[in-house]
Amino acid sequence: MHPVKRIEIVSDSVELAKIVEALKEAGASSYTIIHNVESKGIKGTVFDDSAVTMLDNAYVIAFCPPEKLKALAEAIRPILNKFGGSCWISEVTEIRSVRCISSL
């Protein structure tokens, strides 16, 4: 078990590629994307009632080592400030069982 930072982002799908690239460049160890999520924030409720998927919201959950969090936040902040979206960061513990292939 070891501590990691959990980053949760809700943004429109148009900016998703920029967000994912920023996560990769900043050293996020893994991420998951859930498309077509409904959300409510300071701009009201956002949900997709059309066939245009680029207007969908996406939910991104990513994890990174604590020492990479500052770089990650600095990479994500300008994207969210310019295009909108929300980001939350929390501390979590990762439990991973690593098995070496050579020992099989």
Image (cartoon, rainbow, N blue to C red):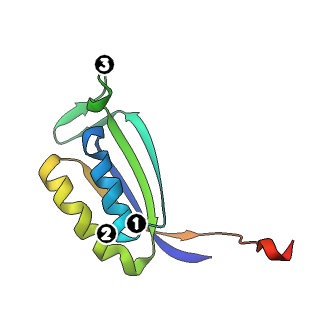
At label 2, which amino acid type do we have?
Answer: Leu
- Specify which label sits upstream in the sequence, 2 or 1: 2
Image coordinates for residue 83, horizontal then vertical, percent:
16, 47
Q: Nearer the viewer, residue 63 or 92?
A: 63
Q: Which mark is residue 22?
A: none
- The relative height of residue 28 versus residue 51 in the rendered view (above or below) is below
Image coordinates for residue 56, horizontal then vertical, percent:
31, 32
Number of residues whose C-alpha sits closer than 10 Å to that of mark 1, classed few (under 14), some (14–19) or many (20 or more): few
- Specify which label sits upstream in the sequence, 3 or 2: 3
Label 3 vs label 2: CA separation? 32 Å
Please state which of the two labelled residues, at mark 3 or mark 2, is closer to the viewer. 2
What residue sits 43% from the left and 54% below the top? 61
- Specify which label sits upstream in the sequence, 1 or 3: 3
Helix, strand or loop for disc 1: strand
Tell me: 55 left or right of 94.
left
Q: Residue furthest left?
A: 82
What residue sits 17% from the left and 42% below the top? 42
Q: Residue furthest right?
A: 104
Which quadrant: the N terminus? bottom right
- The relative height of residue 33 versus residue 51 in the rendered view (above or below) is below
Q: Which residue is mark 3?
A: 49
Q: Which residue is mark 1?
A: 90
Image coordinates for residue 6, horizontal then vertical, percent:
43, 64
Q: In this figure, what is the number of numbered marks?
A: 3
Q: Which residue is mark 2?
A: 72
At label 3, which amino acid type do we have?
Answer: Asp
Please state which of the two labelled residues, at mark 2 or mark 1, is closer to the viewer. 2
